[in-house]
């Protein structure tokens, strides 16, 4: 552990500092907050107790919690320094495929922080929260319209939680119609890892469907239905546009195969950004889908969350949605309906990621119907532009504009010829960090691939800069491939030893 | 306004580079039959000024702890939150980053989550903690799934005094899995160690007990978990309140193996129930079975301290159907708020906050029970929340208090609380924010109903 005193210049005898300019890659390690603790320091105080003290039985009292003791200014500098050691959408191009790292409008933050939204207790009576219920009800309607489906539940906390909820709804539906044996969920080999993991949590058996040339192999889908027996299949779970960045045009056929087997089509809506207003999942046979508001509807990713994963379903599945459901009464007032006898029950405490949904409402309202369609167009345009400019150097298995094979909102590249020169994919990604660009998603859905998603909100200038950087990295590889193994050289740290971290896990500070 | 930045001229130039004739050509993969050629039936786009008006108007139609005095708890509490947390957590470098997959580009959030894990482990008195789950109820469900997986057994003993939403979520999670929920009956609002002992058998995987429980009562974790451990391999799961942990005996001090709870009291706004923060801690032996992200401390190529996601082979993006959980996106920004909150309050500040809650709640309980017709429903020890039986239905009292701009508490008999308790029960929570003056005002309202 490098202490702050070792890495910062020391005072000279004369009391002057010998100041050394610090390049970013030469920054001192930020000590953990516990190392900055000074007994007796306080960052904030409470007013004196204004009621008499009462005895607390000693057998109930626990030992003090060893939290740090730090003054207010040092708290500010600590977290400010930490923030400066992060890449973010605000500060960097962040083309992390499948995550849709678009601009996060600040009006949304302003709205969610309004006292009239942020300071509501979840168990208050409906008559006190009519504005909030209206916002939830309208969000529900917006999402129903965008999905082209009949009813939305706003409860799930994130995409994976939406998958869990959607699969539970499917299970409940089949149980209710006397087909509880349907427990097999078909999942493409290119699916998000959450898909099979959600199946397991719902006691569904995830069976892998092959993809060929980036698309679901429908013959394999048919074969699996026959092999397992149509009456054991619960659903086919597909992402469309899929994780290879392609819209699967045979989606209706896949839906027909499911429906003919008496099964359902689940759409993972992670890539809705590419089709907003262009097509609707309800139009291509979707029975259940989830949204990721933090992807499609600009709610911030917050270092990993919170998200929200509302699900949309067709009429026949609506009775099984989790409660409570936000409703509009005949007199135009709003209420939470808790009387849903066929509901799967609760999937979380209280009712929703309300604060996230405020931002989601604000985004959809800002865009309007034409704006949402434009979002899809710009997302797809930007991805195709990057792909077109890079495809001669970074090979792309599915992109060939001359043959009319465009990508959707993201593309994958497997840069074989560069990798053949003795660099690893990781070297390329880490070198991007030196250029202030967050590396794309790696090794998924293909081995040795980068998945690049520029989103709809980047300027052409940023896109061109990215191309320049990627071409320059390619030149660096031509010149001296070994040098890339050193990357990053100009980041808050050099390459982290992830192998050591997993071999000897240190998950808490023991100082 | 849709926030895109590419101009029509730039679009033409870009299409030319792509070799497409128009933007529609890029969408030809979507078959004509399923193209949506209509306009979505949504309100027309709004400018920022219109949005501000519209949102402010909707917000103004809500009343709550911001313009009333709040004595509501029931799993979400109106605690003080220092202003600097909004300032720091609102920094774009935190707000607009994502899961720290790339360690070299994410040292800030990684170190903050490492500090968070340490604080949660210390708060619960357990060895390790993860970097957050969605919220309290799903955190408890994940704890139970981990215990089932760990033990290979199927009976889940759950206190009937666990929050009704949490029990409902557990029912949903276990519905299709090999796991049987058994509810432990309460005596005097609490679970007796003897009850745990009686219900244990060879198929018992875990015992789940919340303290303070849904009635605000402090449970006998020591006795109950001691009883649980009389049988090999039974996991003791403590459902905790983080503020109470700063004063009362912690899960780890009472021999819990796993602790799960709601982190909302740690600087997370009430926000009508979400987004909140699932806290999850456990003994070392569960390290490789934990759900969710774990941050590890390591070194970089120059030997300097560095942080990264670790033990990812537990997770869905590596392990798929065999992952320990399906969770991907967690509650990063709220974990960040909580870690800042714990730092700002500090060792003594958080304990003092808990003490004030305790003393104030007991002051109010004493004032109320001095009124004719009011009594504590149970006589067990409580922390910052307690249930009184009133001379009239709680809903009548709540309505009367509303007119005085007071949120008097929660009627546990109502649908929102799963109809536990009786019509005349009123569940009252008191945080450090409540003043003597505010409490006396509530007592005045209750006095109007005294017999």
Image (spheres, coloured by chain):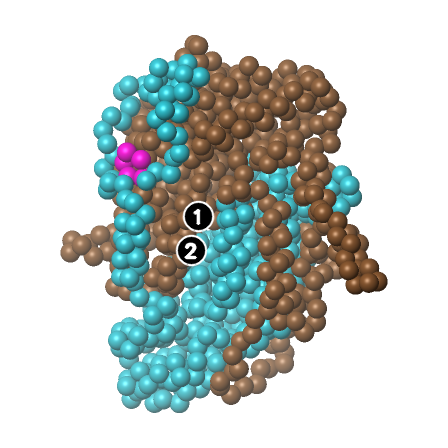
Residue A93 part of the magenta segment = no
The answer to whether residue A391 shows anywhere in this view is: yes
The stretch in magenta equals A367-371
Q: Is residue A86 left or right of residue B366?
A: right
Quadrant location of the N terminus of chain B in the rendered image: top left
* Residue plotted at (78% across, 54% down): A18
Q: Is residue A2 left or right of residue A227?
A: right
* Residue plotted at (82% across, 63% down): A14
In the rendered structure, find residue A157 and report the number of the disc placed on it: 1
In the rendered structure, find residue B274 and report the number of the disc placed on it: 2
Is A504 drawn above or below residue A284 in the view shown? below
Q: Is residue A64 left or right of residue A303?
A: right
Q: Which of the two residues, B138 or A175, is positioned nearer the viewer here?
A: B138
Residue furthest left as drawn: A331
Q: Which of the two residues, B419 or B338, is positioned nearer the viewer here?
A: B338
In the rendered structure, the colour chosen for chain A is brown
- Residue A60 quadrant: bottom right
Density class for disc 2 (Cα within 10 Å; few <14, some 14-19, many ≥20) is many
**Mark 2 belongs to which subunit?**
B
Q: For numbered disc 2, what is the local secondary structure?
A: loop
Q: Which of the two residues, B168 or B363, is positioned nearer the viewer here?
A: B363
Q: Which chain is cyan?
A: B
Q: For numbered disc 1, what is the local secondary structure?
A: loop
């Amino acid at each position: 552990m490098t202490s702050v005193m070792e890495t910062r210049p020391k005072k000279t005898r004369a009391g002057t500092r010998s100041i050394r300019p610090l390049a970013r890659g030469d920054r001192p390690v930020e000590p953990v907050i516990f190392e900055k603790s000074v007994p007796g320091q306080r960052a904030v105080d409470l007013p004196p107790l204004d009621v008499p003290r009462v005895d607390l039985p000693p057998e109930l009292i626990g030992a003090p919690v060893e939290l740090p003791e730090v003054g207010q200014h040092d708290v500010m500098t600590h977290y400010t320094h930490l923030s400066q050691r992060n890449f973010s959408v605000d500060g960097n191009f962040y083309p992390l495929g499948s995550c849709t790292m678009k601009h996060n409008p600040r009006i949304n933050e302003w709205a969610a922080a309004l006292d009239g939204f942020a300071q509501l207790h979840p168990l208050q009576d409906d008559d006190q929260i009519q504005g909030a219920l209206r916002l939830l009800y309208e969000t529900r309607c917006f999402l129903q319209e965008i999905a082209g489906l009949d009813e939305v539940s706003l409860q799930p906390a994130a995409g994976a939680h939406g998958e869990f909820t959607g699969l539970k709804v499917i299970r409940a539906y089949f149980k209710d119609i006397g087909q509880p044996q349907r427990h097999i969920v078909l999942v493409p080999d290119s699916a998000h890892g959450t898909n099979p993991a959600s199946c397991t949590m719902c006691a569904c058996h995830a069976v892998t469907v092959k993809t060929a040339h980036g698309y679901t192999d429908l013959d394999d889908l048919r074969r699996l239905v026959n092999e397992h027996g149509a009456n054991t299949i619960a659903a086919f779970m597909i992402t469309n546009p899929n994780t290879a960045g392609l819209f699967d045009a045979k989606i209706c056929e896949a839906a027909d195969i499911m429906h003919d087997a008496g099964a359902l089509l689940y759409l993972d809506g992670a890539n809705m950004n590419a089709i907003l207003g262009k097509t609707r999942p309800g139009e291509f046979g979707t029975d259940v889908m989830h949204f990721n508001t933090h992807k499609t509807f600009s709610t911030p990713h917050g270092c990993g969350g919170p998200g929200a994963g509302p699900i949309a379903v067709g009429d026949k599945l609506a009775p099984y949605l989790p409660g409570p459901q936000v409703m509009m009464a005949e007199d135009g007032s709003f209420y939470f309906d808790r009387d849903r006898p066929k509901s799967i029950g609760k999937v979380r405490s209280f009712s929703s990621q309300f604060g996230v949904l405020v931002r989601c409402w604000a985004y959809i309202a800002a865009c309007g119907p034409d704006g949402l369609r434009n979002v899809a167009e710009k997302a797809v345009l930007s991805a195709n532009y990057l792909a077109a400019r890079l495809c001669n150097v970074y090979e792309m298995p599915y992109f060939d504009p001359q043959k009319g094979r465009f990508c959707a909102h993201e593309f994958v590249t497997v840069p074989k010829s560069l990798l053949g020169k003795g660099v690893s994919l990781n070297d390329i990604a880490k070198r991007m960090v030196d250029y202030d660009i967050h590396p794309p998603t790696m090794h998924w859905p293909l081995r040795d691939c980068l998945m690049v998603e520029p989103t709809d909100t980047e300027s052409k200038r940023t896109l061109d800069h990215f191309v320049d950087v990627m071409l320059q990295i390619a030149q660096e590889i031509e010149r001296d491939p070994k040098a890339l193994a050193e990357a990053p050289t100009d980041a808050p740290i050099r390459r982290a030893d992830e192998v050591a971290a997993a071999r000897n896990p240190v998950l808490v500070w023991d100082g | 306004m849709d926030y895109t930045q590419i101009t029509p001229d730039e679009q033409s130039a870009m299409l030319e580079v792509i070799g497409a004739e128009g933007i529609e050509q890029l969408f030809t993969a979507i078959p004509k039959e399923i193209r949506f050629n209509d306009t979505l039936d949504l309100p027309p786009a709004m400018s920022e000024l219109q949005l501000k008006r519209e949102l402010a108007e909707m917000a103004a139609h809500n009343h709550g702890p911001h313009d009333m005095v709040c004595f509501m708890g029931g799993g979400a509490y109106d605690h003080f939150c220092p202003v600097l947390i909004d300032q720091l957590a609102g920094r774009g470098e935190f707000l607009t980053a994502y899961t720290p997959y790339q360690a070299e580009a994410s040292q800030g959030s990684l170190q903050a989550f490492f500090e968070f894990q340490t604080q949660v482990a210390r708060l619960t008195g357990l060895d390790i903690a993860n970097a957050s789950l969605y919220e309290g109820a799903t955190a408890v469900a994940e704890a139970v799934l981990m215990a089932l997986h760990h033990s290979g057994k199927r009976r889940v003993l759950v206190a009937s005094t666990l929050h009704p939403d949490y029990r409902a979520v557990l029912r949903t999670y276990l519905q299709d899995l090999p796991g049987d929920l058994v509810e432990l009956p309460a005596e005097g609002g609490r679970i007796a160690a003897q009850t745990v002992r009686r219900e244990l058998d060879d198929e018992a995987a875990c015992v789940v007990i919340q303290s303070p429980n849904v009635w605000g009562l402090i449970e006998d974790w020591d006795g109950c978990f001691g009883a649980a451990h009389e049988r090999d391999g039974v996991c003791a799961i403590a459902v905790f309140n983080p503020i109470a942990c700063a004063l009362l005996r912690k899960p780890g001090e009472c021999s819990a193996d796993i602790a799960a709870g709601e982190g909302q009291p740690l600087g997370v706004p009430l926000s009508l129930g979400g987004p909140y923060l699932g806290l999850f801690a456990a003994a070392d032996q569960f390290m490789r079975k934990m759900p969710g992200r774990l941050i590890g401390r390591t070194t970089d190529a120059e030997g300097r301290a560095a942080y990264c996601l670790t033990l990812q082979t537990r997770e869905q993006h590596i392990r798929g159907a065999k992952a320990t959980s399906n969770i991907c996106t967690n509650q990063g920004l709220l974990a960040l708020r909580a870690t800042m909150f714990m730092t700002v309050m500090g060792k003594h500040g958080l304990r003092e906050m808990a003490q004030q809650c305790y003393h104030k709640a007991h002051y109010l309980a004493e004032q109320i029970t001095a009124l004719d017709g009011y009594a504590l429903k149970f006589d067990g020890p409580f922390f910052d929340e307690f249930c009184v039986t009133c001379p009239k239905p709680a809903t009548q009292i709540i309505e009367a208090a509303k007119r005085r701009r007071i949120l008097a508490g929660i009627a546990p008999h109502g649908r929102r609380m799963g109809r536990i308790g009786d019509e005349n029960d009123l569940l009252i929570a008191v945080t450090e924010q409540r003043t003597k003056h505010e409490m006396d005002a509530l007592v005045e309202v209750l006095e109007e109903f005294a017999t």
